[in-house]
């Protein structure tokens, strides 16, 4: 009996061999550029995964919540970028983290109001608080418009002259998720790089410090052709990859390191479609492939060894039920999956699916579950 | 300063006054019918909420995972329906729960294979295992087709003659979520009732026991006009309600008892759209209102006192960012929300949004946070 059969379902499997390969791949790419990789731990949220990734990447990480920062600080990490514009109400916790890490927590701002709040808190609490200015390169999320000198200098001065330390700029290419092939993703990477480098130059030419130029997204990290002027690259989902990344051509299905192990619990009487014990609580409601060329429903279904059953996807989810069916237009035939059969579902979005679980069941080279790695969540 | 200002954001607020009103409303309706309410704890996943709801409804609850069942058994609950077709691999845990609760855990099956597995496990472990047959009334999820005598009798006999105890039938009107107004939801309720009652009669006429006829969904529980032959009604989301239920006309916006408290952290430079510190990790990726007359995006935005800002919704979410904008076609004007402003987001789907959080920040009559109630998750 395969060791997987012993696992309670649904559970989140992590193929450590694939993960290590994914980590090494991007690390080698960054090493070739001579640029530091600052892995984003928002996907993994795991001290054990961080230990694997930091073995290659070094001491610096990115986090998406102060809860992550607190967990990593407690584990000894001393160089963290909290890559979400900080809410004023979180400045007390940030200052405590700064103290704990010897000034090792960097914040992000994109407005004079936030910069003033950060600076005032730093001044009043005596914190050596470093901050980056977020640069908007494609209108997808937050940030000062790339190259907007007036806005950049106003935010930079509010930080630097108010009592905090401007440390540079950061940008994120949300637009790279539109894909379009290697050339389009390389173009997105160049937009991201150029916007960040230009913004840093504007700051420097005005006499403001901008030692850090931080860029990144998993697609641009893998397709950038030039990183001139960039001091570090951030990426997170690359450790695990997912169907969205496979749909973009950033990875293959065989690189996806996480999957949800589930059990067939019945069949719809009319269609014969199998029903599994993994609904949206286990898979998430993420439909990131809905807009891609191949819509993977709520996930691509594989056998217990991880081999996809052709076009079989999770067509619909309830809270604790997933209904399997062939992708629309498939010429294939759905496999017969008796009750009790275990399957593995590859996720649309690794961050979202992993966030639904409290731990990883970690598989080693033999395909057996060898460890359980806890995850943390919350804020 | 409002006490809410002291809360870390994002966090999940629970308005206990609204919740108590929602609980009382459905309880009064069931009392008028003289039918037992078996509240479904899959939405709340909280011992504290269960205590409130069981004060009126009595000793019996519904659960969606064995983890829930274990938590409630440890808290002394002795009558539980695990309302998901059981996977054979979970029978050991179910038997332990049966022993712990004096036979108080009922299972659900919808196939001969599952019935045989349940019966064999009961026989071999010496467990007095009761089970219901799930009835499919609308093709939406699992179940034996309502009224399919051959299938019903085969499953019933496999249970009863194999060593388990057939306890009746259960149905769930997934179709009621299509809405269509009170008459349509009443019709869905009648379809659900009729299918379950017919199926129970078929079993009884063949000499099989079917004391329990369990039906339910939140819409049908609120719009059923006849419950003749029904012994119990299940519902879960009614305790909290949500935008999907408001869109169906099951509740008003002023009945929605949970919301996500968030803080404005910036504005998009081009549009001025506010960005909050609640992304999909806090709101979930559920888009349950996407197919309704009013699409609420990822949630309807209210001020800190819970009053909606007209047509302001969460237009887009990233992992830790939510971008606010007026609903398309709105003639209104977006409110000015400076950085640091707290807002409350009403969720599309209470089950999904609550599942993203580890606890409720519970507000009492004064609108202040008075308690923290832990939630449990996982399987």
Image (spheres, coloured by chain):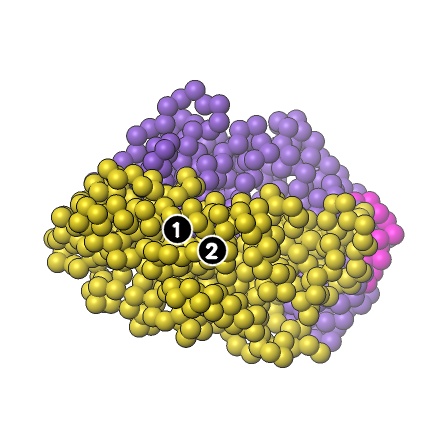
Chain colours: A purple, B yellow
Residue B127 vs B47, above or below: the answer is above
Residue B58 vs A212, above or below: the answer is below
Residue B356, image x and y in percent? 51, 58
**Closer to us: B127 or A213:** B127
User: In this rendering, would A184 be left or right of A11?
Assistant: right
Contact, CB < 8 Å: mark 2 with mark 1?
yes
Residue drawn at (74%, 57%) of the image: B310
Residue A31 makes an appearance in the image: no
The magenta-colored residue range is A146-158
Crowd around label 2: few <14 · some 14–19 · many ≥20 (10 Å): many
Element under label 1? helix
- What residue sits right under mark 1 in the picture? B193
**Closer to us: A326 or B210:** B210
Residue A374, image x and y in percent? 41, 57
Residue B205, image x and y in percent? 21, 47
Task: Check the picture and name the quadrant holding the N terminus of chain A.
Answer: top left
Residue B314, image x and y in percent? 67, 52
Q: Which mark is residue B224?
A: 2
Chain of the residue under label 2: B
Q: Main secondary structure of the magenta part?
A: helix
In the rendered image, residue B249 lying in the magenta stretch gets the answer: no
Chain of the residue under label 1: B
Element under label 2? loop
Residue A68 vs B115, above or below: the answer is below
**Closer to us: B27 or A189:** B27
Residue drawn at (32%, 46%) of the image: B198
Residue A250 vs B25, above or below: the answer is above
Residue drawn at (57%, 66%) of the image: B257
Task: Check the picture and name the quadrant holding the C terminus of chain A.
Answer: bottom right
């Amino acid at each position: 009996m395969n060791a997987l059969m012993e696992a309670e379902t649904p559970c989140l499997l992590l193929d450590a061999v694939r993960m290590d390969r994914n980590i090494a791949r991007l690390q080698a790419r960054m090493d070739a550029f001579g640029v530091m990789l600052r892995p984003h731990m928002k996907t993994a949220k795991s001290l054990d995964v961080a230990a694997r990734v930091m073995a290659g990447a070094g001491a610096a990480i990115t986090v998406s919540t102060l809860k992550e920062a607190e967990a990593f600080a407690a584990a000894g990490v001393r160089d963290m970028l909290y890559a979400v514009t900080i809410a004023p109400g979180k400045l007390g916790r940030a200052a405590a983290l700064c103290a704990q890490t010897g000034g090792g927590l960097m914040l992000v701002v994109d407005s004079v109001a936030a910069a003033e709040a950060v600076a005032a808190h730093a001044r009043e609490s005596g914190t050596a608080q470093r901050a980056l200015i977020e640069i908007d390169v494609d209108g997808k999320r937050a940030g000062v418009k790339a190259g907007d000198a007036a806005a950049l200098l106003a935010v930079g001065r509010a930080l630097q002259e108010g009592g905090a330390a401007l440390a540079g700029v950061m940008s994120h290419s949300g637009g790279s998720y539109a894909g379009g092939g290697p050339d389009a993703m390389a173009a997105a990477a160049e937009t991201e790089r150029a916007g960040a480098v230009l913004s840093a130059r504007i700051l420097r030419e005005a006499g403001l410090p901008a030692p850090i130029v931080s860029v990144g997204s998993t697609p641009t990290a893998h397709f950038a052709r030039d990183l001139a002027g960039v001091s570090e690259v951030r990426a997170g989902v690359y450790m695990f990859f997912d169907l969205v990344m496979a749909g973009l051509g950033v990875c293959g299905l065989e690189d996806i390191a996480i999957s949800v192990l589930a059990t067939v619990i019945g069949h719809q009487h009319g269609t014969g479609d199998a029903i599994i014990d993994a609904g949206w609580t286990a898979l998430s409601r993420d439909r990131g492939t809905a807009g891609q060329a191949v819509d993977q429903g709520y996930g691509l279904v594989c056998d217990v060894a991880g081999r996809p059953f052709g076009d079989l996807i999770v067509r619909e989810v309830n809270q604790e039920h997933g209904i399997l069916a062939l992708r629309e237009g498939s010429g294939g035939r759905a496999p017969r999956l008796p009750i009790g059969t275990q399957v593995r579902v590859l996720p649309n979005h690794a961050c979202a699916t992993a966030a639904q679980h409290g731990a990883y069941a970690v598989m080693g080279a033999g395909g057996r579950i060898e460890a359980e790695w806890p995850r943390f969540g919350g804020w």
